[in-house]
Image (cartoon, grey):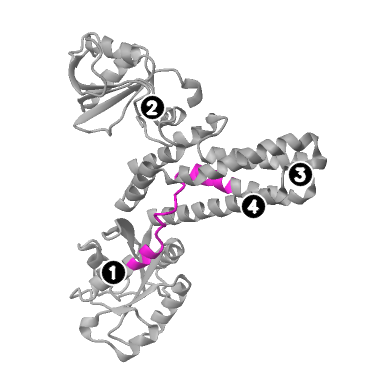
């Protein structure tokens, strides 16, 4: 059943993760008041005030002592009457409580259903709902900071609102002149439509580009490459501050890539740091497979560190390995500075010399890594489009604008009205104001239960 078809029902779900000491069960809908009185056997608690109650969990089950919060419509997250029950977090307790709620008429909430109702009832915008989902699932401070900013300030809504009103006016005029095509330029100035298309394309492309920067860094990967035995695993361990990779003087020890999370504190970004098999020609089947994986990783990594032995003259393996990744603009680093700097090391133009043995230069390397990722960070002043489904809608809108522009000079009033209506519909869908709100099922279906 679609979310829109469930409006008017009372829904319930757990709003906390399994294993929490305190479990929160959220209930929203018209039967909340009845359920509160039925479960506690007492009058409704004062709105927005935590009270202690003993709750009935059903026949043969001892009551549960819980903290109860009651929110009256429209002053709640969903805009409906809403209750939260803070109970002991044991799984059997939560299951028993939910089963009893369902036996009393509540329905199990679908993923994202609480947030869907919040959007429908005007409590939050679609952009804020998508930001909330991102915030809940954030894996780094970088993600949570951007999501929290969007949730609190809703810059997206304020950016899009002026365009919405202009498209509303354009569609009204376009539909009106369908029966009077000879007056198309009189009542619907095409230069105004062209200007609206330009403004829309510029704004949406700007938002999309910034959002892609966010997505790119949300899955950021930093790969260490180089020929065998130049200290890649040692650098991997140094950057992590722990002995995560095995280190051996024997070349080719690393046969497959190894990854771990590297935190860049100044920007709050968590990066997947990857150690890799040394790049060289080999007849060893396992090592060959490792080299192939390394080459594949170079194409999907955000940034690459190319490491070589700066205490010796670069050899053909160094040059060949660098040539394989040169198109990715790697950060070139010379290792083993504790053994001295070979005069020929400058041939590969290293950005700095480090020693994974003593730790010399590692701090400077971290600064360089951070600078590279910072340069690709999204602009906090430009709103983000959260959720892949909304990205697709934005891309469809850009295509619709291009189609509309293509018929501007055709003097076909009916065709122009159709293309203008499509642009308006997609912009309204992107802004969370679609006439058919069932189109949002695919967005909210990816949300957590209880959210």
User: In this rendering, which labeled residue sits more in front, label 2 or label 3?
Assistant: 3
Q: Position of residue 55 (x, y in %)?
A: 21, 15
The residue to which callout 3 is attached is: 186
The residue to which callout 2 is attached is: 78
Q: Are marks 1 and 3 in contact (CB under 8 Å)?
A: no
Alpha-carbon distance for marks 1 and 3?
A: 60 Å
Q: Which residues are magenta?
A: 371-396
Q: Secondary structure at mark 1?
A: helix
Image quadrant where residue 125 sits: top left
User: In this rendering, which labeled residue sits more in front, label 2 or label 4?
Assistant: 4
Sequence order check, earlier mark of 2 and 4: 2
The structure residue drawn at horizontal position 30% and vertical position 76%, both measured from the top left corner, is: 230
Q: Secondary structure at mark 3?
A: helix
Image quadrant where residue 266 sits: bottom left
The structure residue drawn at horizontal position 76% and vertical position 37%, both measured from the top left corner, is: 177
In reply to whether residue 185 is colored magenta, the answer given is no
Q: Which labelled disc corresponds to residue 367? A: 1
């Amino acid at each position: 059943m679609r979310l829109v078809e469930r409006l008017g029902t009372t829904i319930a779900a757990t709003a906390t993760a399994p294993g929490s000491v305190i479990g929160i069960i959220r209930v929203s809908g018209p039967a909340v008041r009845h359920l509160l009185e039925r479960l506690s056997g007492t009058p409704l608690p004062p709105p927005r005030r935590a009270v202690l109650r003993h709750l009935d969990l059903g026949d043969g089950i001892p009551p549960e002592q819980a903290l109860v919060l009651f929110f009256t419509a429209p002053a709640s997250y969903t805009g409906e009457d809403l209750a939260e029950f803070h109970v002991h977090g044991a799984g059997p307790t939560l299951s028993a409580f939910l089963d009893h709620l369902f036996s009393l008429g509540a329905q199990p909430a679908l993923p994202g259903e609480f947030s869907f109702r919040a959007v429908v009832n005007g409590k939050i915008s679609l952009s804020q709902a998508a930001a909330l989902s991102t915030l809940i699932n954030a894996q780094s401070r970088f993600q949570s900071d951007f999501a929290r900013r969007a949730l609190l300030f809703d810059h997206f809504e304020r950016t899009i609102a002026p365009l919405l009103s202009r498209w509303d006016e354009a569609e009204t005029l376009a539909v009106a002149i369908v029966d009077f095509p000879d007056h198309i330029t009189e009542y619907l100035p095409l230069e105004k439509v062209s200007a609206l298309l330009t403004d829309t394309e510029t704004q949406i492309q700007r938002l999309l580009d910034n959002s892609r920067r966010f997505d790119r860094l949300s899955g950021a990967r930093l790969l260490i490459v180089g020929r065998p035995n130049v200290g890649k695993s040692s650098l991997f361990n140094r950057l992590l501050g722990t002995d995560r990779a095995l280190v051996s003087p024997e070349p080719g020890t690393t046969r497959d890539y190894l990854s771990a999370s590297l935190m860049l504190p100044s920007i709050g970004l968590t990066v997947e740091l990857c150690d890799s098999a040394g790049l060289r020609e080999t007849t060893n089947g396992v090592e060959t497979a490792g080299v192939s994986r390394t080459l594949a990783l170079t194409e999907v990594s955000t940034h690459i560190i190319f490491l070589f032995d700066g205490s010796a003259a670069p050899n053909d393996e160094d040059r060949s390995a660098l040539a394989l990744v040169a198109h990715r603009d790697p950060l070139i680093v010379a290792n083993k500075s504790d053994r001295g700097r070979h005069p020929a090391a400058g041939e590969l133009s290293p950005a700095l010399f480090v020693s994974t043995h003593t730790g010399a230069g590692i701090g400077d390397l971290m600064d360089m890594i951070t600078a590279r990722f910072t340069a690709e960070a999204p602009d906090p002043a430009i709103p983000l489009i959260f959720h892949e489904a909304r990205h697709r809608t934005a891309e469809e809108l850009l295509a619709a604008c291009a189609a509309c522009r293509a018929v501007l000079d055709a003097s076909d009033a009916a065709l122009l009205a159709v293309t203008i209506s499509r642009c308006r519909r997609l912009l309204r869908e992107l802004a969370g104001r679609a006439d058919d709100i069932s189109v949002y099922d695919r967005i909210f279906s990816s949300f957590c239960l209880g959210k």
